Image: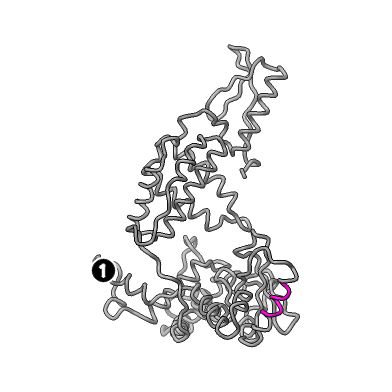
Amino acid sequence: MSNVSSLRPPKYRLHKAKRLAVVTIRGRDIYLGKYGSASSKSEYRRLVAEYLQSGGQGPHAGRQDVTVAEVMLAYLRFAKEYYRKHGKPTREFEMIRDCCRIIKPLYGRTPAIQFGPLRLKTVRQAMIEVDHSRKYINKNVERVRRMFKWAAAEEMIPASVHQALSMVTGLRRGRTEARETTPILPVDDTVIEQTLERLPAIVADMVRLERLTGMRPAEVCMVRPKDIDQSDEVWIYQPESHKTEHHGRDRVIPIGPKAQEILLRYLARDTSMYCFRPCDSEAKRRADVHANRKTPASCGNRPGSNRKRNPKRSAGECYSTGSYRRAIHRACDKAFPHPTLGYKLRSCFTDAEKKELREWQSGHHWSPNQLRHTAATEIRQKFGLEAAQIILGHSSADVTQVYAERDLAKGMEVALKIG
């Protein structure tokens, strides 16, 4: 998939000295034959079609000087258009870009045909040294292989380059220096309650909603009134986008009475607006600060008078999974501060203190995904494995419509009982 519409095809021109038709692609003149002849125009149309199809890279067959940097640049252009949802690049594109940032200083100027298994292993070692986990490294190595496979399909490099890279096997548990990730476990409800006290009201409601429904974090962030069918006792929420939509699946989330009570406060707005908005949370925070001010209103700054005209960042219309997670982590820092370092300025930390704080936070932070695990554990214990798969949307992608309807009925029954 290439961004063909934004490219301008090179011109068919006359080389006056040679009296031949010529076209210039990526700085290289290609002679087409006698100017104005049918054969030269046919060759021109073929070369331009290849140029547009390759996203402006032009014909590469037979070239030995294509560098790894050129392959990465071409693939990033392709990936930015291919890995998109609702007009925005997905997380997959960001991870591909992160891989390229590791490869570029090592082998950016290296001819792509020389990028073999040993050099891929060197890149993998660089990922280990920046403390990526074993599973994440294996996924990134597969992304690198996929990039060279794409380049071979575009005739930028010989197919043998990708075939050689496929010989590199993944890192095995216990046989590598790469760290292992701990499994995502449910978070205890008492810990959630302690954290809720430190969260902004809107984020706290997002946490409560996710805990009751088992939604994915992204699905909580994008709730809109128009996506919720309120016509029945159990509401049905169909998010505008979800993780498995590229498989042709629909995501249907039943919302029971307790979750409905949380959402009711956010439905009296334009139906296309997001229910949980950072700009609303920031406005509420500022209002609370103003209400609790001790300086008389006639003195000091008035509301809105001490803001930057053009701030680099401002509160937006929708939480991202990252901003949602960071808000929870900040609340965890307040709810479970380090005994000695919790109130010390970070700029004054020594390296040993930074390491100590990171270890403390890793044991006292929890993330939105753990709420989903908590909901799954509860549903499985009370209603069985099938009910948990239905509520969480874990059914296989090729289920029939009849089976989906039966699942929805059972999911609505569960939602009524657990709220």
**Residue 335 on image: x %, y %:** 39, 82
Between 160 and 232, the one lying in front of the other is 160
Look at mark 1 in the image and give the residue it sits on. 349
**Residue 163 on image: x %, y %:** 49, 41
On screen, residue 125 above or below 399: above
Q: How many marks?
A: 1
Please name the residue shown 65% across and 59% down the image: 247
Look at the image and tell me in which quarter the C terminus lies. Answer: bottom right
On screen, residue 31 above or below 201: above
The coloring applied to the image is one colour
Q: Main secondary structure of the magenta part?
A: helix
Please name the residue shown 57% across and 79% down the image: 209
**Residue 397 on image: x %, y %:** 65, 63
On screen, residue 362 above or below 256: above
Answer left or right for 293 relative to 401.
left
Residue type indicated by callout 1: Phe
Residue segment shown in magenta: 404-411
The quadrant holding residue 390 is bottom right
The quadrant holding residue 12 is top right
Badge 1 element: loop
Look at the image and tell me in which quarter the N terminus lies. Answer: top right
Between 416 and 222, the one lying in front of the other is 416
Between 16 and 94, the one lying in front of the other is 94
Dot 1 alpha-carbon crowd within 10 angstroms: few under 14, some 14 to 19, many 20 or more: few
The quadrant holding residue 246 is bottom right
| Magenta-drawn stretch contains 413 | no
**Residue 311 on image: x %, y %:** 47, 62
| Magenta-drawn stretch contains 406 | yes
